[in-house]
Amino acid sequence: NTEVFIGNRDDILCCSCASGPAFEGAHIKHGMRAVTGAIESVSIEPGSFDVEYTTIGDARPVGLCGSAMVDVVAEMLRCGLIDGRGRLNADVETPRLRRTGGSVEFVLAWGDETGTGREIVVTQKDIDEIQLAKAAIFTGCSILMRRKGVERDDLDRVLIAGAFGRYLDPRSAMVIGLVPDVPVEKMAFVGNTAITGAKMALVSREAREAASVIAREARYVELTLDADFAREFANAMYLPHRDLERFPSVRRLLERRR
C-alpha cells in the first residue's frame, strides 16, 4: 500500500491507497526491485522512437524498476505510443512495437544490449498495472484534498518518501497523473522516512513525543467509504486524468505533441 498525508501544523488527514506492488517491479513482465542492473530511467525520442536508458550501477540491463515504468508510460504518452486510456497504438511504425500472442509490446532493450541476452519489453498488461497503481494513489490525493478543502495551487510542497522516490522523475510522475500537477520545484524526495523516523525516536524523547502527538491527532480517511471513491478512481485511470483541466501543464505538453 501507499500512505498519503495532507495537512499543516494544525490538522493532518491520512489514508492508505491499495496501489499494489507494481512500483516495486512486481506484476511487470520484466520488472524488478531497484538494484544493480535495473533500468532506472528511460527517454523515448518522438518520431524515431529510439530509446535511451540508464541503469543502477551502470550495469547491463536485466529488468526495469518502478521508476523506469513511470518514465516509460510518461514517454509513451508524450510520443503518441499510447493514448489517454493507456492503449498501445499498434499503427505506429517502429520495429520496437510488435504484436505477440494477441497483444502488443514495446521493446526497451534489444537482446544484445542486456545482461541476460533477452530483450526487455513493456507489455500492455504492464501499462495497465501502472495505471491501476497510479489511479489508487491519485484517488487518495484527490479525496484528501477535497476533505481538507484545498486546491492544487494551495499545495506548498509535495513530499515523496520511500526507496521508490529515490529514482522517480517528478515530471514523469506528474505526466502520468501519479501526483497533482504542481511546479516541479515544489516536489521533494525525502528518502526512507520510516527508518529515519525510527532512528530519531530511538535517540530523542522529543521526537518520540512528537510522533505520538501526530499519531493521536492525524485523522484517518477510509477511501472506500467515500461517496466519490468509485468516480474518482475511474477518472484517475486515464493518463493523466479524465479531466485534463486538473493537469494543465500536462495538457499543454500533449497539445504541443499534436
Image (cartoon, grey):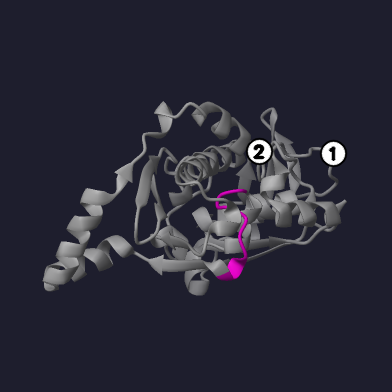
- In screen coordinates, is 93 left or right of 159? right
CA distance for labels 2 and 1 = 21 Å
- In screen coordinates, is 100 left or right of 255? left
Quarter in which the N terminus is drawn: top left
Q: Nearer the viewer, residue 64 or 221?
A: 221
- Kindly identify the residue that appears in the image at 62 percent across and 46 percent down: 122
Tell me which amino acid carries mark 1. Answer: Asp
Image vertical order of residue 193 relative to residue 81, above or below: below
SS label for mark 2 = loop
Q: For residue 90, what is the image quadrant?
A: top right
Predominant SS along the magenta part = loop
- In screen coordinates, is 178 left or right of 140? right
Contact, mark 2 vs mark 1 (Cβ under 8 Å): no
Q: Position of residue 153 (x, y in %)?
A: 60, 58
The reply to whether residue 78 is in sight is yes
- Kindly identify the residue that appears in the image at 59 percent across and 36 percent down: 125
Q: For residue 114, what is the image quadrant?
A: bottom right
Q: Position of residue 106 (x, y in %)?
A: 69, 46
Q: Which residues are magenta?
A: 177-185
Q: Nearer the viewer, residue 116 or 201?
A: 201
Q: Which mark is residue 238?
A: 2
Image vertical order of residue 96 relative to residue 53, above or below: above
Q: Which mark is residue 91?
A: 1
